[in-house]
Image (cartoon, rainbow, N blue to C red):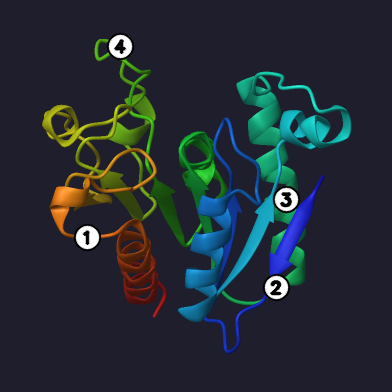
């Protein structure tokens, strides 16, 4: 498994950070968010699912692995990190990575769960929500979501009766990558900074 470990100075927790379906662990979003989280005192462990690691070797673009393979990758890395670090461990992911993490957070007894752009439903398939396990989730969860996310808009998601353990931080006029429209008055960098600060505050309040 391809893994990148970035240690924050005076870290108060370790966050395991999974990529989304189409971009690797060193994509611009993953790189930027990792740097911002490190500045907040959060150590970050990034990794790649088998299909993405294979893409680096042969340049092909295979679809994501089956869910059981994705989950086993998460479990394997969690056990490895658990044995090597002290302090709280937080599960996190961008889009698909966050969805897989959310399915395992209770099982692994993570201190918290962070999702950046949760894929609540496939594009243009509002009648196929991926929320069954989110109704009874017990792990303290923060979802950073753009109001105009094509995989989970505010208008639609607010109709769901999600677990009380879930808190959603809505970013005005932002898309699935938390990038806002220009007329919002905010830049992408500002929203990513806001997201990192919110993550740090959320986790600190729950691991104190």
User: Which residue matches tag 1?
Assistant: 186
Left or right of residue 204, residue 148 in this image: left
Disc 3 or 1, which lies upstream in sequence? 3
What is the secondary structure assignment of the residue under circle 2? loop
Residue ID for mark 4? 125
Please state the horizontal and vertical placement of residue 60, each as a whole percent of the image.
78, 22
Q: Which of 83 and 153 lies nearest the eye of the viewer?
A: 153
Side (left or right) of 78 relative to 177: right
- 178, 109: nearer the viewer: 178
How far is mark 3 from mark 2, CA to CA? Answer: 12 Å
Return the residue nearer the eye: 205 or 108: 205
| 77 lies above or below 189 | above
Per the image, the residue denoted by label 2 is 85
Which of pointers 3 and 1 indicates the residue nearer the eye?
Answer: 1
Mark before the other along the chain sequence, 3 or 4: 3
Mark 1 or 2, which is nearer the eye? 1
- Classify mark 1: helix, strand or loop: loop
The answer for how far apart the CA atoms under marks 3 and 4 are is 32 Å
């Amino acid at each position: 498994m391809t893994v990148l470990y970035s240690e924050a100075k005076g870290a108060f927790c370790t966050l395991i950070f999974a990529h989304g379906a189409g971009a690797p662990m060193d994509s611009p979003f993953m790189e930027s968010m990792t740097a911002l989280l490190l500045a907040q005192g959060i150590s970050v462990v990034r990794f790649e699912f088998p299909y993405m690691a294979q893409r680096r070797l042969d340049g092909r673009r295979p679809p994501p692995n089956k869910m059981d393979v994705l989950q086993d990758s998460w479990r394997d890395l969690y056990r490895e990190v658990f044995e090597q670090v002290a302090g709280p461990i937080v599960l996190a992911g961008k889009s698909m990575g966050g969805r897989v993490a959310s399915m395992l957070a209770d099982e692994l007894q993570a201190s918290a769960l962070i999702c950046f752009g949760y894929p609540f439903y496939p594009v243009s398939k509002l009648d196929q929500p991926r929320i069954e396990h989110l109704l009874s989730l017990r792990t303290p969860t923060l979802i950073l979501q753009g109001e105009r996310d094509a995989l989970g808009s505010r208008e639609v998601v607010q109709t769901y009766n999600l677990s009380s353990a879930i808190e959603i931080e809505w970013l005005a006029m932002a898309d699935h990558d938390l990038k806002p429209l220009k007329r919002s008055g905010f830049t992408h960098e500002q929203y990513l900074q806001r997201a990192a600060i919110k993550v740090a505050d959320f986790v600190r309040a729950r691991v104190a």
